Amino acid sequence: MGLELRAYREPDFSQAVFQKAPDAVLKPAPFDRVAPEGYHAMSIFPEYFKMDGKWLLAAESRMDCVPRYQNGKVEVVEFRHLKKGDRIVCGRTEDASEGIYVHPNGFAETKGERDVFSFRQNRTRETAFSKDYDDLYEVLKHDRDHGKIVWVLGPAVAFDHDSRAAFSKLVQNGYVDALLAGNALATHDLEGAYLKTALGVDIYTQQGQPNGHYNHLDTINRVRYHGSVAKFIEAEGIDNGIIYSCEKCGVPYVLGGSIRDDGPLPPVFGDVYEAQDRMRDQIRGATTVICIATMLHSIAVGNMTPSFRVLPDGTVRQVYFYCIDIAEFTANKLADRGSLSARSIITNAQDFIVTVSKGLGL
């Protein structure tokens, strides 16, 4: 039958609580990068603000940012991007009493649906995930044609021949619209294509190679010698892997650096805030986000991903957010985001990728 998106129900603004509510209070930012006292901080849910007697939805949201009103729209801005004089919404209530209303239940559920999907806390290695996989296949098939699918990968995905091949098939068949990762994922994937190892371990046999601890460094050094990943791929005859497939298919990838990075590869963003901005560029418009085996990147992306998306035609739809990890703590870390916003699957990263690829018939 295919995926049927849950209908969004906006608040009934004809109710007295909304009609009698005052306009939201606006105060100027006192300095660049500084919000006024009493600023309002955003959540992952749809939020409405009363401006000149009209309730406006902040269409592009992000948790822990502030709402700025300009040009007749409510924009959501990181503190570091504020400019002196920006008009910032102030108020810390969420019940419309200050012209601010947070709407967490716009995607209403029946009781049966709640039993299956809602608030997936305390999921463990003993949980059966068959239904989750079936649902995920439907989500991916739908959003390949009607959405934007963003993947967030840890380096474990690149440690195995089959998972690299499986993810490459996802890229080549339109199931990946953007990839967010760190230096390690790209380095070990390129190492796998260049030297058939990841951290010096054969990606197929899983046997360590003599002097294998040099392999990732040699790979990085060779990429830097050629000046770019694209030139490395061309000059060295690389014909497989995750990054190769992204380059070949024009899929954007953002690599956020860390203090412990080796090299790093040329496209890695060493400035953490620039990396955050580039990651958010890709998260804007995302309708499905899948985070695999990377706790810090998963939490970071979870913080910048709202539970909803406003489509070009004005339709409000839910965002599907998956967190995949073999560690129960990591996979359940974002469970409090709420139903259909975050689902956790406790499994090995490589097995997950291979299972999804096969489940989609690739």
Image: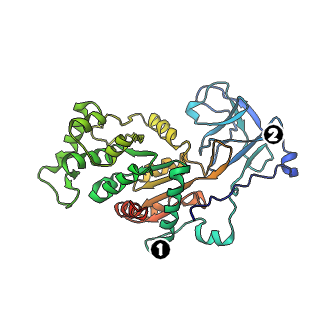
Q: Residue at x 49, y 41 (%)?
A: 282
Residue 128 is marked as 1
Contact between marks 2 and 1 (CB within 8 A): the answer is no
Q: Residue at x 62, y 58 (%)?
A: 5
Q: Residue at x 34, y 41 (%)?
A: 248
* Amino acid at dot 2: Lys
Q: Is residue 90 left or right of residue 271?
A: right
Front-most of 134 and 299?
134
Q: How far apart in space, not on screen, are marks 2 and 1 (Cα)?
A: 47 Å
Residue situated furthest left in the rendering: 210
Residue 102 is marked as none
Q: Is residue 109 left or right of residue 299?
A: right
SS assignment at label 2: strand
Q: Where is residue 335 drawn, in percent x and y? A: 54, 60
Q: Is residue 66 above or below residue 356?
A: above
Q: Is residue 346 above or below residue 255?
A: below
Q: Where is residue 85 drawn, in percent x and y? A: 67, 24
Quadrant where the image shows the N terminus? bottom right
Residue denoted by label 2? 54
SS assignment at label 1: loop
Residue 62 falls in which quadrant of the image? Answer: top right
Q: Where is residue 50 drawn, in percent x and y? A: 78, 40
Q: How is the image coloured?
A: rainbow
* Amino acid at dot 1: Ala
